Amino acid sequence: MIKVLLIGNGAREHAIAEAIRRSPQPHKLYSFMKSNNPGIRTLSEKCELGDYNDMEKLSSFAKNVGADVCVVGPEAPLDYGAVDALAKIGVPSVGPVKELAKLETSKAFTRNLARKYRIPGSPAFEIFRDMDGVKEFLQSLDSFVVKPDGLTGGKGVMVHGEHLKDVSDALRYCESVLRSHASVIIEEKLEGEEFSLQSFTDGRFVLDCPPAQDHKRAYANDEGPNTGGMGSYSCADHLLPFIRKSDLEEAHRITELFARAIEKEHGKLYVGVMYGGFMVTRDGVKLLEYNARLGDPETMNVLPILSSDFIDLCFGITNGALAKTKAEFDKKATVCKYVVPQGYPDNPVKGEKIELGAAAGAKVYYASVDQKPDGLYMSGSRAVAFVGISHDFAEAERLAEEAVKSVKGKVFHRPDIGTQALLDKRVRHMEMIRGKK
Ligand code: AMP
Ligand code: GLY
């Protein structure tokens, strides 16, 4: 009997839990959550509620249930050293140790590694610990992006032309970042279309999931504030309408080079997920950032169509045997749409009841909701994700849209995600960018 420990309580972890439970091997799932996710609870043998920085509680839960392997969902436990703590009691994890989770938690770590090991795909960038030279570097770029060095929940990145009007604006922002962070990164602003490539790695072999595209803006037509991601899609051919196979190969190569560079630089293997946020530009594929975990919502595009054994995959990753492990994904399109509370992300309603309609044909993944005896209540963040899956892209979109539209309560969603009109817009944008050369 294989005992799998899962850390996390969002829709991503609900999808991970489901993938674990589909394994044909005898197994039991144990989940460590910060709050009660009804979907994960139903799939688990036993759940423990605790904070992600409570290593003692986590370790004793892992020991008590006799965990054989752990899958870490979110970035916070990685940053708190969950993988290191579990390793001490002999439990291997799908996830990097704290030192290597810096791939996500420190943008300077990642950019410096690329520079030192001459990994292609970085924009022009400089890292500053104080304001010396900041103005000159900003002035040397046509357009720029300013990033704090550290975890900011996706909210600290400021883009010229969107959030920053000019160099003076950027200087003020850099000063404020340096008051709370050790350094600030300034990058050339790139133009293109973004995609997510989530890869599993045992530190040497890199195995990609089909690529997906997330939608960060809150409202239709990519308007409104940035969010954790309102929805995402993937295509039956395991490409995206605006990328070529060679773009994917380039992104894969970058991730392989990073894995190799990490081993050389740190003398240990990066084990877990390397999820690259890439951008296809007129000069090829560029890396915007890495995450050290699976994406949310992009997990819901890939794990539901994984037809091979996820538990096998986990052991392939932790045992250094990924090259010999099978991972097969159905050739199906997926469209994921989140229903979120009104006012999300800046001023969401909280504690409001929602009722899910008949999600006929769509998969349902619970996120920031609490199951009470009299119903389901939203806690303020993205509430429930719905995923349509079909050989036909339009049908996948229809299934997700029907399901998300049937939710009753103080909610909204993005009806445009996965529509042909939005796909066409992305394709035209990319054609324009490529044509610029
Ligand atoms: P990051 O957290 O580094 O992925 O940045 C968040 C978002 O900022 C990305 O998803 C992009 O939309 C944007 N972004 C980051 N870096 C750049 C860049 N060098 N050029 C253009 N946009 C960027
Ligand atoms: N899709 C955005 C994230 O997982 O960070």
Image (tube, rainbow, N blue to C red):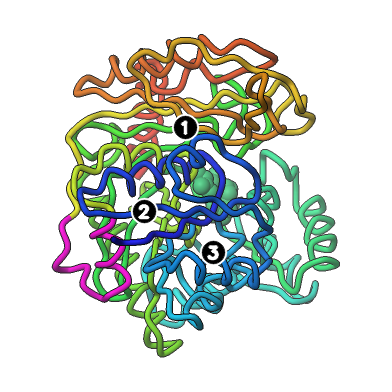
Q: Reply yes or no: does residue 321 show up in magenta.
A: yes
Dot 2 crowding, Cα within 10 Å, few <14, some 14–19, many 20+: some
Q: Residue at x 55, y 65 (%)?
A: 61
Please say whether residue 290 is visible from this viewpoint.
Answer: no
Residue 345 position by quadrant = top right
Earlier residue among tags 3 and 1: 3
Residue 298 position by quadrant = top left
Identified by mark 1, the residue type is Tyr
Identified by mark 2, the residue type is Lys
Q: Which mark is residue 28?
A: 2
Q: Residue at x 47, y 64 (%)?
A: 65
Dot 1 crowding, Cα within 10 Å, few <14, some 14–19, many 20+: many
Q: Which mark is residue 365?
A: 1
Image quarter (top left, top right, bottom left or bottom right) of the C terminus: top left
* Residue 119 against residue 398 in the figure, above or below: below
Q: Residue at x 75, y 28 (%)?
A: 348
Mark 3 sits on what residue?
Answer: 104
* Residue 15 against residue 91 in the figure, above or below: above
Q: How many marks?
A: 3
Q: Assign a secondary structure to mark 2.
A: strand
Which mark is nearer the camera, 3 or 1? 1
What segment is highlighted magenta in the picture? 311-326
